[in-house]
Amino acid sequence: MPRFLLRRLLHTIFVVWGVVTAVFFLVRLTGDPTALLVDPSATQAEIAHMRHLLGLDRPWHVQYVDFLFAMLRGDFGQSIQQRRPAMQLVLEHLWPATVELAVAATVLSTLLAIPLGIAAATHQNRAPDHLSRLASLFLQSMPSFWLGLVLILVFAVQLNGLLPAYGAGTWRHLILPAVTLAAAPLAQNVRLLRAGLLDILPQDYIRTARAKGLPERLILYRHAIWNTAIPFLTVTGLSVGFMLSGAIVIETVFSWPGLGRLIVQAIPGRDFPVIQAGVFVFALIFVLVNLAVDLLYAVVDPRVRLS
Amino acid sequence: MILGKRCGVRSLALLALAIPLCASPAHPAADAEGELIVALPDDTTNMDPRIGMGSIRSTYIRQVYESLVDVDARGKPVPGLALSWKAVSPLAWEFALRPGVTFHNGEAFNADTVLFNLDRMFRRNLDRWGIKEVPAGTSFEKAFPFVTRWERVNDLTVRIHTSDPSPTLWDFIGREPLVPKDYTIKNGVEAVNDRAIGTGPWKLVEWKRKDSMRLERNSAYWGVQPQFARLRLQVIPEAGARVAALRAGQVGLVDAVPPLDATVLARDPALKVVSSPQKLHCRLYLNGRLKDAFDSGGRDGLFTDSRVRLALNLAINRDAIIKKVFHGYALANVSPVSSVSSGYTAQEPYPYDIARAKAMLAEAGWRDRGRGVLEKDGAPLALQLLFPSKHYGQAFDEVTLAVAEMLKGLGVPVTIRPIDFATLLQTVTKGTLPYDGGFTSCRTSNNLDADDYLRDWTALSLINWTPYPPELLELYKATRRELDPRKRLALLADLQRNVRDWAPIVSLYQEIKIYAHSPRVVNFTPLTELNMDFRGVALTK
């Protein structure tokens, strides 16, 4: 186990370094932010002065070495657009807004998926199964911006402000964006669980358990469902990673002050420090979530040996 | 602002005296302790006015910071932190400052404040004050190099000297928001941006980036106070969600209502829709530079001949654009100056006349020689149209596509290249616009005078792709020298007529900004400026 963790730690450092290096050069290939900061009537001399002030007139390799040393000190530079420390901006948007939303949506999509997936699998080709498949298809195929706007119109406008239409801060603010964000992963989880259970339920060891007279509930929850856990964990891990790295559409519709909108706005604004800090955090989140998923594999399936 | 109209005061001097006296009485059912939540499509990136004031930033910055020259609802200059201003000689302007004004932290506003701000604007004496230079949108020392020095006449009078006569100095200096001197020196320029302290009607309480800004009424404000206690500028990026929040009663006022939604909301008796022409003037810029003025590959820009640019103007059906795309919420202004700028003169509209446009192209030598395209010297007349998609909004994108189709109707093949705004700016900055290239974009201004627009075709800049010919450059310079207001207005009118005929751009439309609000919001008047003004606005219970 310690060797596994050490190996994964080195792997994490290598992956994060690779990602930030690629991003460092890629964002510079997209162009120069200077023109966005000056008046349209600015002359070449004014633009050159601005580039100098931002340090963008230095050769790329000089900028890169400076960036790496600063990054080791946790300094990702100042946001070009907002003139504040880039990492501070990223962390302000990650916590609590993005984490709150991602956790709520993950809990919702996981907890609801289990009974719905089981109901669909144990009632195959009957009403609960049809209903569950139809609902999954609907939730997965519905664009999230549309679902979000419909929920706002129903719960904020038609029901006289039952829930807030925008913003963050209280559990009431969280409901509509979390439901919207959870919709697609919930549908995916239900389908995954149903398919997994339909594979497992006809197997010999389940038949043996039934022959031994074990109650159906025990068979389902003790013997069947754990064997669907590995693919379920893999998919949930990926969707948690995506949710933590920001849900741009949901953040836009509900005016949720999360990380996704910050980064997406930084890209056309060529705000290099914010993009670099944001991608660093994304890479770290993905690597750590994957590590957590790998560790959980060993918990749910003793055959997996981390060493 | 709103006040000027309500008080009915016409004279600048009288108005200056009248402002503190005209504080309108509280609305009978006013909720003096209420909060107005205003939904905006975006947050400001900065509060330090030196960094930049464009677009939505102005609405945030001007609640807290004020400038020497204020503006009324019709776009006319009125006294702000200066009671009056005048040219005391052909080469000097004097500003008489408003007495008794303090910043939100109690620091006094006086001549020293103005001198310090001038130092920041023109990047002088920064070492002496011990403050850093900030990357600024406008380089005053480069844009206005003729401003030579400034001095304190007394505690409430500042004199600014120029090397050439400058009739618009009151505007480009006077409209710049002013920051406190001692606070900036003590806390650094970062504080001006992060913890803004101004003289304005609202004090900044909390700024959650990309989410909301909370402000409270400045009870020591020198002018008309807002009649409610708290203001929240709430970011709601999606237009549909902004309108839904208004209908749900969760915001009081919505900025940037799409024209189509405005027509629907206007029918709702529970809401009010108000609008005002804005300075945003959208155009098609064409490459009319000579080969030595851009990365040309040895060729002059294809649109150097004004007859070709005029023909393109005649091929645009502006009435159809305004009716179909904007549902009436736009203006067909063919002057290079926004209709709400000081010195604007309405120009004769370009008729939509394809036959005349074709004749004009033929006169310029562009003829179809049987190959289905207009040619001259073996080269085809075509346009590579760059446009910043999703930058100015859906209506702008639709207009660009409509314009491309209209030009095709004239026989000019158009290749549309949607790009992001930063890439467009980079292309025009580097001078790598194709020789047959053009781009659609919008021009706005933080200043009141027409000069800010007419300056566009002087020095080569991002948007100057058709530099003034010598005679127009002379005429422009004359407008910059003339100090007599009446003569200068005549010169500006003459220049606008000439620019209209010379057609450096294909003018498309001028925006009308639309707001919707709850009936609880009383006395809200949209400005012709980029910002919103809540002075005198009340909330009913």
Image (cartoon, rainbow, N blue to C red):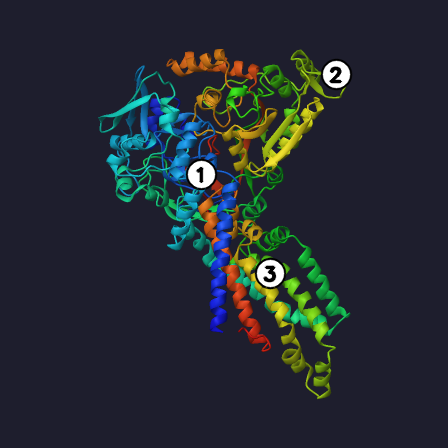
Percent position (x, y) of residue B117?
Answer: 31, 32
Q: Quadrant of residue B474?
A: top left
Seen in the picture, residue B76 relative to B38 is either above or below; the reply is above
Seen in the picture, residue A149 relative to B448 is either above or below; the reply is below
Say what amino acid the circle numbered 1 marks. Answer: Arg
Seen in the picture, residue A80 relative to B318 is either above or below; the reply is below
Say what amino acid the circle numbered 2 marks. Answer: Arg
Badge 2 is on which residue?
Answer: B369
Q: Depth-wise, is mark 2 or mark 1 nearer the camera?
A: 2
Q: Depth-wise, is mark 2 or mark 3 nearer the camera?
A: 2
* Viewer-proximal residue among B35 and B378: B378
Q: Quadrant of residue B185?
A: top left
The Cα–Cα distance between marks 1 and 3, rounded to whole angstroms, is 34 Å
Which residue lies at the image location 44% right of the left edge and 28% below the top edge? A44
The Cα–Cα distance between marks 2 and 1, rounded to whole angstroms, is 52 Å
Q: Secondary structure at mark 1?
A: helix
Dot 2, crowdedness within 10 Å: few (<14), some or many (≥20)?
Answer: few
Percent position (x, y) of residue A253?
Answer: 57, 50
Badge 1 is on which residue?
Answer: B57
Q: Is residue B155 left or right of residue A258?
A: left
Which residue lies at the image location 60% right of the left edge and 66% below the top edge? A234
Q: Which mark is residue A182?
A: 3
Same subunit, labels 2 and 3: the answer reads no
Chain of the residue under the numbered disc 3 shown in the image: A
* Viewer-proximal residue among B32 and B128: B128
Q: Secondary structure at mark 3?
A: helix
Say what amino acid the circle numbered 3 marks. Answer: Ala
